[in-house]
Amino acid sequence: MTQAAQLRALLAQDKCHVMPCCFDALSAKLIAQEGYDLTFMSGFAASASRIGAPDLGLMSYGEVVDQARNIADAIPIPLIGDGDTGYGNAMNVRRTLRGFARAGCAAVMIEDQLAPKRCGHTPGKAVVGREEAFDRIRAAADERESLREAGGDILILARTDARHEHGLSEAIDRAARFAELGADILFVEAPKTVAEMRSICDTLPGPKMANIVEGGETPDLPNAELHDIGFAIAAYPLSLMAAAMQAMVTSLRAMRDDQRPGQMDFAELRRRIGFDGYYEVSEAYASSRRD
């Protein structure tokens, strides 16, 4: 089963999938090892991890696809890639779909923000006009069909940030049109209340994704409530990165005081990275065996 087919099967289930978001191959590997069904490469976290810079459109298409390729190669579960605005006009969107599919992604997110895009829960974001937004999803759907004809496959996660500037009604209207154009999953970013979240799910067809940023604008609800509202995916884009950063800062401060903070023991660290599996497989090859 392809990664895209795996994702379709998950979306057909009557549940809200908890989706911790990764930022590199190791964080994605840990997500898979802990039994989660899918993950998303958070643009916010990947930008912080790869270039040490905020998610303000600074990472290039090539850097993002390369990051996605490394992640997809490390895990057996479906990966959703962050395709931002598609990196240009409709033809760039088509290239983005093709690149993420070849990188091994099960789906790619395309949004209607004005480039350079911004994190959905930070100030200053704006969206393009309706027709340009629709062209992006139309182009994505056209490229998806071309990929299928060639034996490939990828899903489209269509995102709108129109709630911020134009209100919930405009955001829902845009998302509804995205669905008509062929989007597989809908994502209305940053609803501010539970009532708004319910309105999104009650109005729009197909699978919907909630984006839960701790301290962000969208209510952080229990998974059972998100499922009851109607969401198929609950994304947590910053949880792992925030935890990792806190652990590293704590360790660095302790080491400065000549202390040794609690940490994962060396044996488990090696196992999770893959040393034990490597040695087990390499025993079949004389030239690869350990001394």
Image: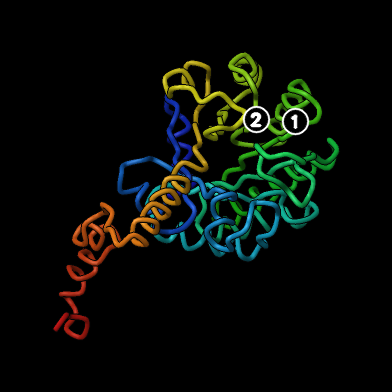
- Percent of width and height locating residue 137: 72, 42
- Percent of width and height locating residue 154: 56, 48
Question: Which SS class for mark 2?
Answer: loop
Horizontal side of residue 61 vs 88, given as left or right: left
Badge 1 vs badge 2, beta-carbon distance below 8 Å: yes
Question: Which SS class for mark 1?
Answer: helix
Q: Which residue is rendered at x = 46% and y = 41% of the image?
A: 239
- Percent of width and height locating residue 183: 65, 37
Residue located beneath label 1 in the image: 164
Residue located beneath label 2 in the image: 190
Horizontal side of residue 151 vs 128, given as left or right: left
Q: Which residue is rendered at x = 55% and y = 23% of the image?
A: 219
Q: Nearer the viewer, residue 98 or 270?
A: 270
The quarter of the rendered structure image containing the C terminus is bottom left
Horizontal side of residue 19 vs 83, given as left or right: left
Above or below: residue 222 compared with residue 33: above
